[in-house]
Amino acid sequence: MTSSPTRVDGSAIPGACAVRACGVEKSFGSGDSKVSVLRGVDMETRLGELVLLMGPSGCGKTTLISALCGTLNIDAGRIELLGRDLASFGSSERVRFRGQHVGFVFQQFNLIPTLSAMENVSIPCLLTGGSDREAEERAAHWLESVGLGSHIDSFPREMSGGQQQRVAIARALVHEPDLLICDEPTAALDTMTGRTVMELLKTVATRPNRSVIIVTHDQRIEGYADRIIEMEDGRIRASRAAHPASVAGGTSISVSPT
Ligand SMILES: Nc1ncnc2c1ncn2[C@@H]1O[C@H](COP(=O)(O)OP(=O)(O)O)[C@@H](O)[C@H]1O
Ligand SMILES: [Mg+2]
């Protein structure tokens, strides 16, 4: 049976399962050109933890997170997002649920070039039914939180890569999602700027009632994680605690059954 990770008032319960994948399979193409990308993925993340999903390029990380949040249909297996079986949603209900509960940060920022920072960050609030005024107030708050209070009227072309990624983080958090997914958020940034973005994700994005999944193959950012899930060739190879306390007591490694 599926247990909901929310209280009666709808608030998320820290430590509860945020997203769970069981036996997930996904292929692209057909016949001789069929490529099996996800080959029986079992994993879960919990509210309150920052998880790094790591693995070599092409191992299926982006495909997996697309499946986890329901932007990609799977061929077999089961995905629960915040206690709800994704297969139980109709497509418009799934889009609405994702809009309310999930935030995204992408490698290339994906800001709308013709909109100001404030307008870009307001979008998720407006899409989830907020008034113009509420959206503006929240956007201003979040731009302030990521250190861009003086750039609310700037356009993406007027900002550095690091500043654009901070706008993207504000946009991903403005509707207070339960799950934040970041796909290679530091890959387009130099080392120092990437570190600033990771600091920000650690301090601003992490909450007891939020699960943060960061896809990366940058081993330099391992220190920011509570847990590291290693992926290889369409499967989860290992899931290990990365918290300094755990490391001090001997890193626990659990290898998923194949
Ligand atoms: N829409 C698609 N059609 C066909 N092949 C795809 C598609 N999306 C991803 N793939 C293939 O799936 C494999 C894994 O891709 P991806 O999930 O993007 O890996 P990663 O994010 O780990 O680099 C790659 O070989 C890629 O070419
Ligand atoms: Mg990828």
Image: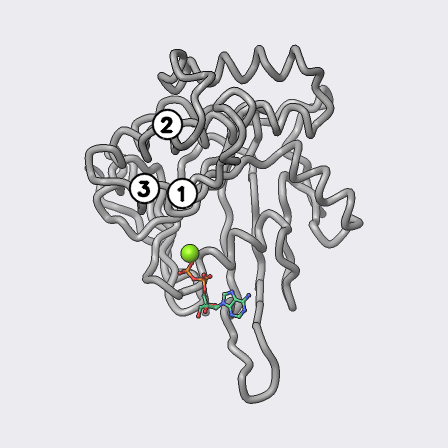
* Residue at the image position 64 percent from the left and 58 percent from the top: 78
Furthest toward the bottom, the residue is: 32
Query: What residue does disc 2 label?
Result: 158
Q: Is 248 placed above or below 68 here? A: above
Label 1: element kind: strand
Quarter holding residue 133: top right
Q: Residue 251: give x, y in percent of width and height.
A: 25, 46
Give SS at disc 2. helix
Q: Amino acid at mark 2?
A: Glu
Q: Which residue carries the number 3 mark?
A: 186
Q: Which residue is mark 1?
A: 214
Residue 6 vs residue 187: left or right? right
Rendered position, 141 above or below 204: above
The crowd level at tag 3 (other Cα within 10 Å; few <14, some 14-19, many 20+) is many
Q: For marks 1 and 3, give the one nearer the viewer.
A: 3
* Amino acid at dot 1: Ile
